[in-house]
Image (tube, grey):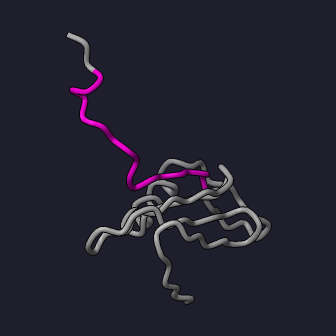
């Protein structure tokens, strides 16, 4: 595992097409921006097991050359934090 220290605005490049940027640091929370192709699956750590279980239940199984069945992996992107504004700002009464 590679451990890096970064400041706000600095980026980390993974391979040729994935970029991670530090957007904000406040106390013990860090806000990250992740730019990756749509076919790259991005999950928060606490959702990984649930996503695997969902894939096994939802996806049809297929047989490989050995006759063993497997569930194809779905392409899913889940973002932890998106900018949200209070609803009152844009409501017209």
From the top left corner, tell me how far across and down residue 45 is, in percent.
42, 69
Quarter-of-image position of residue 30: bottom left
Decide: is 88 above or below 55: above
Q: Is residue 81 magenta?
A: yes
Q: Residue furthest right?
A: 65
- 90, 15: nearer the viewer: 90
Q: Residue at x 50, y 79 (%)?
A: 6
From the top left corner, tell me how far across and down residue 69 is, in percent.
64, 62
Left or right, 82 with respect to 64, comes to left
- 14, 9: nearer the viewer: 9
Q: Residue at x 60, y 52 (%)?
A: 74
- 7, 31: nearer the viewer: 7
Q: Residue at x 28, y 75 (%)?
A: 28
Left or right, 18 with respect to 26, comes to right
Magenta stretch, main secondary structure, is loop
From the top left corner, tell me how far across and down residue 77 is, in percent.
53, 51
Quarter of the image containing the C terminus? top left
Q: Residue at x 25, y 19 (%)?
A: 91
Q: Residue furthest top?
A: 93
Quarter of the image containing the N terminus? bottom right
Decide: is 86 above or below 57: above
The number of numbered discs placed on residues in the rendered structure image is 0
Q: Is residue 75 magenta?
A: yes
Left or right, 40 with respect to 45, comes to right
Which residues are the magenta region? Answer: 73-90
């Amino acid at each position: 595992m590679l451990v890096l220290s970064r400041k706000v605005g600095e980026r980390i490049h993974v391979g040729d097409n994935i970029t991670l940027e530090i957007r904000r640091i406040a106390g013990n929370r860090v806000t990250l921006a992740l730019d990756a192709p749509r076919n790259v699956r991005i999950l928060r750590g606490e959702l990984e097991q649930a996503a695997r279980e969902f894939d096994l239940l939802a996806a049809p199984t297929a047989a490989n050359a050995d006759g063993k069945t497997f569930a194809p992996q779905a392409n899913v992107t889940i973002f932890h934090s998106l900018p949200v504004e209070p609803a009152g700002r844009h409501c017209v009464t």
